[in-house]
Image (cartoon, rainbow, N blue to C red):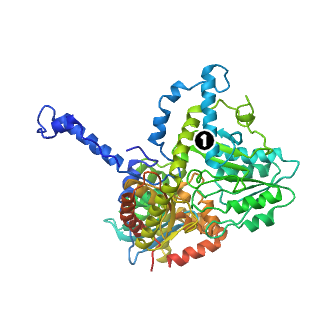
Amino acid sequence: MAKIKKSAFAKATARRSPLSLYGAAARRRKNNIKARKEKMSRIYMDYGAATPVDSRVLKKLGRFPSEVFGNTMSLHSFGQEAKAALEESRDILADLMGAKPQEIIFTGSATESNNLALKGIAFANKEKGNHIIISPIEHPCVGESAKWLESQGFEITKLKVDQYGLIDPKEVERLIKKETILVSVMHANNEIGTIEPIEEIGKICREKGVYFHTDAAQSLGKIPIDVEKMNIDLLTGSSQKMYGPKGAACLFIREGTKINPILHGGGQEFGLRPSTVNISAIYGFAQASLLCKKEIVKESKRLTQLRDKLIKGVMAKIEGSYLNGHPIKRLSNNANFWFEFIEGESLLIQLDMAGIAGSTGSACSSAKLQPSHVLLAIGLRPQEAHGSLRLTLGRWTTSKEIDRVLKVLPGIISQLREISPFKKN
Amino acid sequence: MVKGIYSKKVMAHFKKPHNYGKIKNADGIGNVGNLVCGDVMRLYIKIGKNKNKQEIIKDIKFETFGCVAAIATSSAITDLAKGKTLEEAAKISKTQIVDSLGELPPIKMHCSVLASDALVEAIYDYLSKNKKEISQDLAVKHERIAKEKEETEKRYKDWTDMEKKMLG
């Protein structure tokens, strides 16, 4: 963590008596520094929800938003500068996943990419069939898209997962039928971090002539991805999970794939995503991708160590704590627990008051007042899902921060258990 | 600090809940909510008498499994009920609870219902155990709560069985 330098002014006034002329200002200044320090000592462990933009990305962006602002469709030099930046960004993203540049399109969010993948494939391949297979632990933007497609006459089959959230590729093979047009299984789960065997699933889909889409919003930039080797036809990636700005995402679409746009307009992004191109966000996305690619091996090793320290610490220090998701086949930055006898929202707010930010699958914290569908799918009972806590680490997580969480968390848990009517007898 | 979804008063109750814990040999106990929905509230009351020889809630404590709003409303109702006659206490409405907390997010309003239901149940429990007269108003409320409980139990039988085992 960066140390705050004491300004010359603060130094000069620090020893003055509070009654002196500059006392009040100095005190204010001192309080400001204290407040800033407190703010900086907050611990962010919700990188799975959103990541800050890396300052190196900001530096690369610099005056870009004011200088490269043209419409990529304009023929003048302003437009062509933006167009060049767009194509440069496309090359970078393609390179990150072993694709060709013309196979990458940019969208506004991972939700949009997933909507386009499902709905675009469904409507373009109606003649072939109407059957789509998805996993039961997809992000709502895949799950809800599938649900909507069902209302439009498509048939949706949900796979099963085991207690760790793993898909059995053999089940995919069994469920594919003549009418199947698409299989969508996420690369790594956003809640429990389980990494799916997408290479095997992709292979089966390839053999059966069915399109395979994977939502890699949580894994792109964290796990090396090769769309060729992994037999992927469509892949979703998100800037704001990779230390890039919000408002940019991508969809890899293998050359020759039959897909319809869901928006209609001016023909941008090969006609698949009309809208004036959000060039600053996309350029930032690409710069962030470069950093991820450069640091992928080292960073994943570092995070895995921190994650395992956190998991081991929590399990050892807190009675009645359980790990959700696979112990090994999981994202390097994801730890997800459930605790007996307590409710997640209360836990979350207590942690927030202690300066630690996490998330929960409890019903009370969701807009629908329903516990997480992912935790229910892996066999947790609602009361267990209510007691869940997800901590996701990231680029600025330190070992010291893990220590502080391990110090604070047990106390909060026992305090909440004291209020709870459920107790160990 | 930025304003969260909860008011200052809610957070104050949540940080330092009033009157939590068990009352041994409680005169009445009210159990409401269920684990499937994520809120379980248990209120204990001890009955005493005031100067006019009316029965009052001498002591009250709660145990709650639930979100911030559930814990804060539990804490708030113990404040509201303490010292009140049984008749007054049974009439504490969800609006009174919410008012005493400043405000609750709309999605959490049901937590205030839970708290007033728990108190109704505790008073009903005391009166029926001691074969005392039960007002029609109270009987109607109890019937509604019991019916709702029965319905959720039917819907989530496996899970509520587990809950009972946990409560012991």
The answer, for residue B133, to whether it is visible in the render is no
Q: Is residue A112 above or below residue B13?
A: above
> Which residue corresponds to mark 1?
A92
Q: Which of A264/A154 is in front?
A: A264
Residue A31 percent location from the top left of the image: 25, 42
Image-based side of B121 in relation to B1, left or right: right
| Chain holding disc 1 | A
- Name which quarter of the figure residue A35 lies in: top left
Q: Which of B113/A412 is in front?
A: A412
Image-based side of A349 in relation to A363, left or right: left
- Name which quarter of the figure residue A240 lies in: top right
- Amino acid type, label 1: Ile
Q: Is residue B147 above or below residue A209?
A: below
Q: Which of A37/A368 is in front?
A: A37
Image-based side of A421 in relation to A385, left or right: left
- Name which quarter of the figure residue A207 lies in: bottom right
Q: Residue at coordinates 57% horizontally, 36% vertically from top-left?
A: A283
Q: Residue at coordinates 74% horizontally, 30% vertically from top-left?
A: A267
Residue A233 percent location from the top left of the image: 74, 50
The answer, for residue A168, to whether it is visible in the render is yes
Q: Is residue B141 above or below residue B158?
A: above
Residue B15 percent location from the top left of the image: 37, 57
Which of the image's four quarters has the C terminus of chain A?
A: bottom left
